[in-house]
Amino acid sequence: MFFDLETTGTSVTHDRIVEISMLRLDPGADEPREWTVRLNPGMHIPEEATAVHHITDEDVACCPRFTDLASKIAQAFAGCDIAGFNSTKFDLPLLCEEMARACVNFDITSARLIDVQNIFHKKEKRTLSAAYRFYCDKDLEGAHSANADTRATYEVLLAQLERYDDLPVDSEGLAKFSAMNDSVDLMGRFVRDSAGNIVFNFGKYKGQKVEDVLRKSPSYYTWMIEGDFPVNTKAVLSSIYNRMRMERK
């Protein structure tokens, strides 16, 4: 069984499924059987999620809830090995959460789990040496020496600029393009949401505004300042905390 989910977000425990697609290939079958269905998640689909999968609240307003189809979906998976892309860390755990909420037994203990993303990452190395070979068609001599790695990084960027016509050529554009998210600190513990608010990007308050958390749980500030976090992360947190104190005066 190959499958993929579209969801209301990236939280395995809190977000819901808005679309599930399954492709079941049985031994000896000439063609796989496919089934795709949209679901009403019973909650607002955030604009950030809609920007990814283009499914809106209106699109699923009249669709069935997951609980309506949970037994049928579980039966479709019965006896199958399961394959997906980043499925073992996201799609499958989230599907299990939905099954539990629907009180449907979803036993995958005997299934062999195949994560195509992991195969991709293991076969196509994400190292500077690999990038140098891919973009520059040369082997990186003296890899992991500072000078060789610096020179290789420079050559790789030049090759990327030549290869990709849509890549920005200025520093500001390249910085925005190369960022994985709108990080506020170097480690990405704080990011900006779609409204520009600084929110936590980890832990139990992930997705919540830093200011809101510090107001209702000031001990969290102390925990982070005294904890094993990078100085840059602590500096950003302290800046927010001190600004809040000044505004209260």
Image: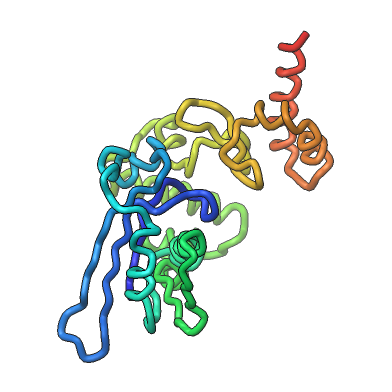
Q: Residue at x 42, y 42 (%)?
A: 43
Tell me which corner region of the image, top left, top right, bottom left or bottom right, holds residue 49.
top left
Q: Can residue 207 be seen at all in this image of the molecule?
A: yes
Q: Which residue is drawn at 75% across and 20% down?
A: 242
From the top left corner, tell me how far across and down residue 240 is, in percent.
69, 24
Number of callouts: 0
Task: Tell me: residue 24, above or below residue 28.
Answer: above
Give 66 or 176, whichever is nearer the viewer.
66
Q: Residue at x 71, y 11 (%)?
A: 247
Give 17 or 202, whichever is nearer the viewer.
17
Task: Give the colour scheme shown.
Answer: rainbow
Q: Residue furthest bottom?
A: 28
Which quadrant of the figure contains the N terminus?
Answer: bottom left
From the top left corner, tell me how far across and down residue 4 is, in percent.
35, 62
From the top left corner, tell me how far across and down residue 197 is, in percent.
54, 27
Q: Is residue 190 left or right of residue 29?
A: right
From the top left corner, tell me how far across and down residue 132 is, in percent.
43, 59
Q: Can residue 127 be seen at all in this image of the molecule?
A: no
Q: Which residue is drawn at 49% across and 77% down?
A: 107
Task: Tell me: residue 15, above or below residue 33.
Answer: above
Give 98 or 181, whichever is nearer the viewer.
98
Which quadrant of the figure contains the C terminus?
Answer: top right
